[in-house]
Image (spheres, rainbow, N blue to C red):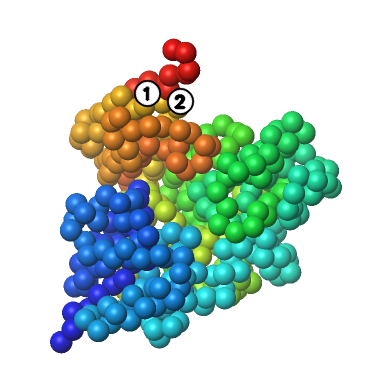
Amino acid sequence: MARRALIMVEGHPRGNGLLYVKAAQHLGLHPITLSADPARYGYLAAERIETIHVDTDNLNALIRECSRLHATYDIAGITGALDSVYATVAKLCRHFDLPGPNPASIDQCLDKFAQRQLLAAAGLPIPAYRLAANASDVKISAAEIGLPVILKPAEGSGSRGVRLCRNIDELAEHTAYLLGGKHIWRSSPRILVEEFVQGPHYVAEIMGNEVIGITAVEFDPPPHFVFRKLTFPAPLTDDDHERIADVSLSCLRALGLGWGPSCIELRWTKRGPVVIEVNPRLAGAPDPQLIEAAYGTDLIDQHTKIVIGDEWNLRRTRSGTAAARFLVADRDGILDWIGGDSRAAAVSGVAEVKFYVESKAPIVRKGDIGDCIGHVIAASPTFAETETILRRAVDLIDWSITPFSTPGE
């Protein structure tokens, strides 16, 4: 009998990739990663995971590779953790008649302009928005909406290229950044100009059509949106939780989603929850670890079961509170050292301490998820106790960055 395999299209350099590998092995599957650049994922070599070099932007090349693998393995499922491959994964699943999301729904959801149009047509609360292709469009759109506005690429994730523009100068500066060759576009440049909706930020964590819980999100100071802290479950009243959950499930219906995981970002405003973005995938690390620390529910394990068509459940084995603090680089330069992880991990109630970078790594901040160099997760039965544990652990971690030398120094 052929060995059952789980195919991963690309991995995840900072967290979920290795967790999917472990989940596959736990379920008796042989994990195989298809990647255009396997060296991006250090865990593949460290764990001796079967890896195949292939152009993951080429659907036909992936079909050929999976067909070749099918001669040796029983392919139980195909999945991926990155936005850039999720639509391709859906098409592969459809081609090989494997469980997976609707490719058309994923495509239209990953196009943030199309997503906005569908949510607006369904009458869901979203920020005012315009689509711009050039600097003139951006300026006109911002005038129509009114400053401050958010400028963001119409595709992508991790807050890459996203900035709050509070005046005309910031608007021109960020437009030049997005259109001047510094931002990497996967297709023709398209910019969303959006109303700056203010209020507490939340993420509805969903599997299928079930809201697992809601995460509270805090960011570093503007103009960028760099994650600083996550708390799960968010300290909400039952009524506010229900309103966010109802709006979130309505988003899934409007976008034709509801298979597997999704995470929906919202802000709580004077008019209630306003949808910022719908992501048709599991939230990136450390969200899954946070939920497991609080509720004992392993979302990556359950998602893997969905991918291979097995029965799954989101049963809680405990009811606590977990919080994660991101470690954010404070300057550009060379990371001389980073330490304190063993001391922080030894604090009672700390669930995980993870560094994303190693000593001597270059640090170049861009105002996105890449500015984070690690995280700490703490968990306990209560919100207050978790806050205390997290603060104590983070205070034990430190690092040093030597600024890049300038010409002439």
**Most foreground residue, 271 or 87:** 87
Q: Residue furthest top?
A: 409
For the C terminus, which image quadrant?
Answer: top left
For the N terminus, which image quadrant?
Answer: bottom left
**Contact flag, marks 1 and 2 (Cβ < 8 Å):** yes
| In-image side of 84 versus 68 (left or right) | right
Q: Is residue 392 visible?
A: no
The quadrant in which residue 398 appears is top left
At x 31%, y 56%, the residue is 38
Give the residue number, with chain letter if any, for mark 2. 331
Disc 1 element? strand
Give the residue number, with chain letter if any, for mark 1. 401
Q: Position of residue 55 (x, y in %)?
A: 40, 65
**Most foreground residue, 102 or 358:** 358
Q: Residue furthest left?
A: 1
- Callout 2 amino acid: Arg
At x 36%, y 78%, the residue is 64
